[in-house]
Amino acid sequence: MTPLGFLERASIVYGDCTSIIYGDSTVYTWRETNLRCLRIASSLFSIGIKRSDVVSVLSANTPAMYELQFAVPMTGAILNNINTRLDAKTISVQLHHCESKLLFVDVVYSDLAVEAISKSENPPILVLIADDEGGADVADRSKFCYTYGDLVTRGDPEFKWIRPESEWDPIVVNYTSGTTSSPKGVVHCHRGIFVMSLDSLIDWTVPKNPVYLWTLPIFHANGWCLPYSIAAVGGTNVCLRKLQTPLIYRLIRHHGVTHMCGAPVVLNMLTSSHQKSLKSPVHFLTAGSSPPEPVILRAESLGFIISHGYGLTETAGVIVSCAWKPEWNRLPSSERTRLKIRQGVRTIGFSEIDVVDPDSGRSVNRDGSTVGEIVMRGSSVMLGYLKDQTGTKRVFKNGWFLTGDIGVVYKDGYLEIKDRSKDVIITGGENVSSVEVEAVLYTNPVVNEAAVVARTDEYWGETPCAFVSLKTGLNRKVTEEEIIEYCRKKMPHYMVPKTVLFLDELPKTSTGKIPKFKLKEIVKNLGSTRLSRM
């Protein structure tokens, strides 16, 4: 089992059908996409990329980004998509950790990439992805050994792509939003990505020849495996560099978009301003955090058909979905929405999902109130964390993957996430470790104590909220803006606290620990942050 075969088949079955649309002038067929991927794979092979090497990509949702999901593993290499929202230091750590041999760089992120490898002893080969839509220039092209166009031109379209020796061979390594000092590279195999790709089609009920708009970053768990899924059914990929509401609606109308994905923040963006109803329904799959009820209601009133799911980088995509029952359509809108915000049940291609008591390991009562840890097992669960046997062993127990997420199961068997152990904050689809943010806050010379929790946000779903006590003896006033600006210089912007609350002293338990549940209660009483805070 390998998802790479989907492209080969698409070139035969859907050869003359449109595979990629980008901007006003770029259109490819599936036959052309297959040949372009073979050419890229051939060129990579000719410059020394071999089986088990890691090849990284730092790019927006361009045709090249889509093609590289196939072309890189067609050489036997392991694909590493990099989050474009990271800073240079974090990218540098990830490249070093996975020992990347080559880095494809979107022209927009060329300066970021050059900075990331500036202090590397063994920097990867740089390949520049340039296109007219990028609208950016490169300060120093001498840093780049090739351009993407060069590799396409020089490659052999008759290249025999290198098949995995085993379906358990690694195909991708994706980094979670872990700490820069201890990155977590999630390794997936060909079999897992194959299963997830087809599972997504079945669970989401995607027909042949869909028109898919790329509002979900492909760097997010390989776009939840949908690059491979869309190839399997001969769909059209409408590539999109920037998320702009007017542009998205224009593309939906012009190309007849049928499917799209994204975090709840994208759905909120599309519905927060007055829009005309869609001429044809558009299926929208959302995951990352539960979409707010008002957002679902607004989206459905415009003609979006909302599906809600749950997954992790470690599962390669959505493996729990709120499978919809026809009889629910007869319920009042508020009741339908309440049901839809639940994460749901396992998808058809996944083996088992359960919510268990962390101490006994037994399943919790299906009463919608007894909490436990969500555990799972199935073919698309990761092989493990790269170079981290200890971390891998920590999250596997008796064949089960321990998610660290806390949930409940209702009487009808549907589960809902209630909290997240380790205090992970999901903001705009990005995972933010509160511990990471706290570590940065503690480096500020004016900060005495710091703790970070999630605050509900009408736009991002959640944002980091920092509680800070200041050091004694300061002879000046410290403001919220000063703390936020300090963080902006030290971490990716999506991780920066949007709210800072000052306390004389943070609460403590008898053992000296900060009880975050008390801080969450304070934040809950504050209510949601507003769009005006953006």
Image: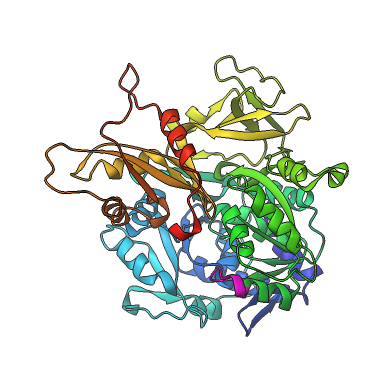
Visible in this render: residue 167?
no
Please give left or right for residue 300 compared with residue 244 in the image: right
Residue in the picture at 32% in, 17% down: 511
Taking the view exactly as shown, the residue that stands out farthest to the top is 360
Q: Is residue 199 above or below residue 255?
A: above
Q: What are the residue bounds of the magenta stretch? A: 240-247
Q: Is residue 73 above or below residue 241?
A: above
Is 180 part of what is drawn in magenta? no
Front residue of 12/366: it is 366
Visible in this render: residue 123?
yes
Please give left or right for residue 390 compared with residue 332 in the image: left
Residue in the picture at 58% in, 47% down: 288
Residue in the picture at 52% in, 71% down: 43
The colour scheme used to paint the residues is: rainbow
Question: What is the chief secondary structure element of the magenta stretch?
Answer: loop
Q: Is residue 311 above or below residue 121?
A: above
Residue 46 location (% of width, % of height): 49, 69
Residue in the picture at 64% in, 42% down: 380
Pick the quarter of the image with the C terminus.
bottom left
Front residue of 94/456: it is 456
Front residue of 409/389: it is 409
Residue 91 location (% of width, % of height): 38, 56
Q: Is residue 183 above or below residue 302?
A: above
How many labels sit on residues? 0
Please give left or right for residue 80 compared with residue 9 in the image: left
Write down the quadrant of residue 469 in the picture: top left
Residue 255 location (% of width, % of height): 73, 76
Residue 492 location (% of width, % of height): 38, 55
